[in-house]
Image: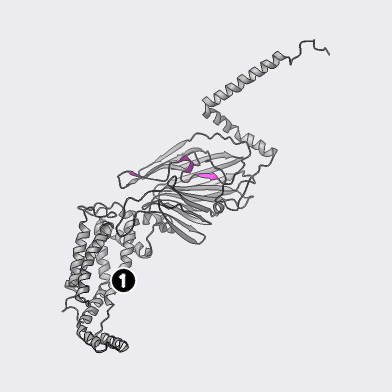
Amino acid sequence: MNQPQSGQNFLDKNTVLAIAIVTMIWVGWTYYQQKKYPDYHAQKEATSQKTTEQQAENASAPKSESTKSAAESGSVVTMNTGGGESLAAASEKTLKFDDEKWSFVVSSKGMGLRDIVLKQYSDRHGNPVNVGVNDTENLPFSTNIIGRNTPIDFSIERTESNQFSGRALVGGMTIVKTMIVHSDTFTLESKVSVESAPETFSGVTLALNKQLEEPTESSSLLPSFERQDWYVEYDGSHDRQHLDFKNETNENYSRVNLASMSSQYFALAVLDKSQILPDLKAKVDLGSKTVKGTLFYNRINKTAAFDHEYLAFAGPKSLRLLESIDGSMANMIDLGWFSSIGIYILKLMKWFYSFIGNWGLSIILLTVVVRLLVLPANLMSYKSMKGMQKIQPEMKMIREKYKDDKQKLNEEMVRLMREAKANPLGGCLPMLIQFPVFIALYQVLGQSIELYQAPFGLWIHDLSLKDPYFILPVMMGVTMFVQQKITPSTMDPAQAKVMLVLPVVFAFFMAGLPAGLTLYIFVSALFGVFQQMVFMRPDKVKA
C-alpha cells in the first residue's frame, strides 16, 4: 500500500478551517430559515415526529407521573410523550358550520368550538347571543391529554355537511375525534378514540368553559334575577352553584353524568354517553372572568382500547328542548324550591300560548285558573272572617269578665269561636296556597327562555324585565288598596290603617321585578276585588 506523502495530510489546518467555516455557514443559514419560515419548519417537524417518537420509545421507556384522579388533586401531571414531540405548535386551522339556527367554528386546537352564535336569540342590547369563550387555550369541548398543558393539534376535515372528523398523532398515539351536528337540538354527538396508547397514558380531558357575565338587571326585592350557575349530576347526587364576580369557587366531582355551565337563559353542557364516567374540576377564574370546567376521562383498563362518547350542548335553556334531549337535562333550569310547581306552571302557560299566541294573555289566564282553584278556600276564609266579626261584642265581654283568669279566658274564647264556626287564621289559608305559585312563577319568569324578550303589548315589550314606566306596579298597588279596603277585617282601627299602607310598600318593592310577575299580582288583586263584589256579598255567604 502506498504511504501518503509528507505534507499532504487530509486533516491539515486549512481543511479543518474550511470545514469549520462551512459548518458555521450551514448552521447560520438553517437558523435564519427557521426564523423566517417558522410554519414550514414546524410542519416538517410534525411530519417526522411519529418516526422519531417511535425510535425514542424503543430505545428507552419514558418516565411519567401518575395520580389516581387529576380532578381530585387539581395538580398538573407532566407526561413524557416519548421525547420526539416538537415544541413548536402548529398554526390553528378552522372549519365553519352555519345554518339558520346557529353557527360555530371548529378549531384544530383540541377540536374545540369558537364563535358559537345562536342566531334566533339576541342579548339585552340587540346583539346576537354568543356562548362559550374564544380563547384558543380554553375552547369549549376541546379534547386534550391528561397532563398536557397545550392543546392537541388535530388534522380536521368536514366529512359530511353536518359531520366533522379529526386525527392527531401524539407520543406514538393516534387520537381520533368525530362530531355529528344536530341543529334541531343544538347538540354535537361526539366520540373520542385513542389507539396505540403507551403504559404512561392516563386518559383525556374535555373542556367546558364559559364567559362569566356580570348581571345587568337587579331588583329592589332581590339582589339580582340575572345570574349564572353550574349544575352537576354526579355519583347519584346533584349540585348547583350560583356564581358571581366576587368569589372564586372551586369544586371537584366524581363519576359525573351531566355537567353544565349556564347563564340565565343559555348554557353549555356535556351529557356523558359512555361507560367511563368522568371526574370534574370546576372553578371560577376571576382573572380571566371565565367559568372553567375540566372533565377527566381517566384510563382504567390499560389492556383495552380507550374511547368515550358524550353529547355536547350549546343552546337555549328551553324546557321542551332539554326534555327532548334527555330528562335530566331539564334540571339545568333552576326553578327553585317549588320546581315541581314551576314546571306545571310553565307547561300550562305554554298550552295557553299555543292557541293565544301572547305570553301576557297566558299569564292572565293562569292567574284566573289559580284564583278559581283557591276560590273555595277564599269562601271559607270570608265565612270565617264574617263569623269573627259577628262575635266581636261577645269576645270583648269575655275579655273583660275573665281578664284576671287567663286559662278561663282561653277556654271561653275557644268555645265561642267553635259555636260561631269562626277561625282567626282562616284568612291566611288562601295566601298560603298562593305563595308557592307566586315563588314558582317568579322562577319561571326569571329562568325560562320561553318568556325571554316576550312582548305583551302597548308599553310592555319584554315580560322578563321590569315595567319601564312602572304603570303595572302603580295599578297593582291601587287595586290591592281597594281590595284591602272592602275586605272584612277583625282588626282594631289603628291596625287597619297600618294594613292600608302595605299595598303602597308592596308596589314599591315590586317596581323592579319582571313585568310578567307584576302582571300576575295585578290581575290576581283585580280578581280579588271582583270576587269580593260578586261571590262574597252578605246575601251570598252566610256566616
Residue 295: percent from left, percent from top: 51, 50
* Left or right, 145 with reference to 138: right
* Left or right, 205 with reference to 502: right
Residue 364 appears in the picture as rendered:
no
Instruction: Say whether residue 456 is magenta.
Output: no
Q: Establish if 353 lies above or below 210.
A: below
The residue nearer to you, when weighing 343 against 409, is 409
Q: Give the residue at x 60% y 36%.
A: 85
Residue 336: percent from left, percent from top: 38, 62
Amino acid bearing label 1: Leu
The residue nearer to you, when weighing 519 against 366, is 519
Instruction: Say whether residue 123 is magenta.
Output: yes
* Left or right, 99 with reference to 362: right
Quarter in which the C terminus is drawn:
bottom left
Query: In this picture, which residue range is highlighted in magenta?
Result: 122-146
Residue 275: percent from left, percent from top: 55, 55
Residue occupied by mark 1: 432
Quarter in which the N terminus is drawn:
top right
Residue 164: percent from left, percent from top: 47, 41
Q: For the residue carrying disc 1, how many other residues have a C-alpha within 10 Å: few (<14), some (14-19), or many (20+)?
A: few
- Direction front: furthest residue: 404
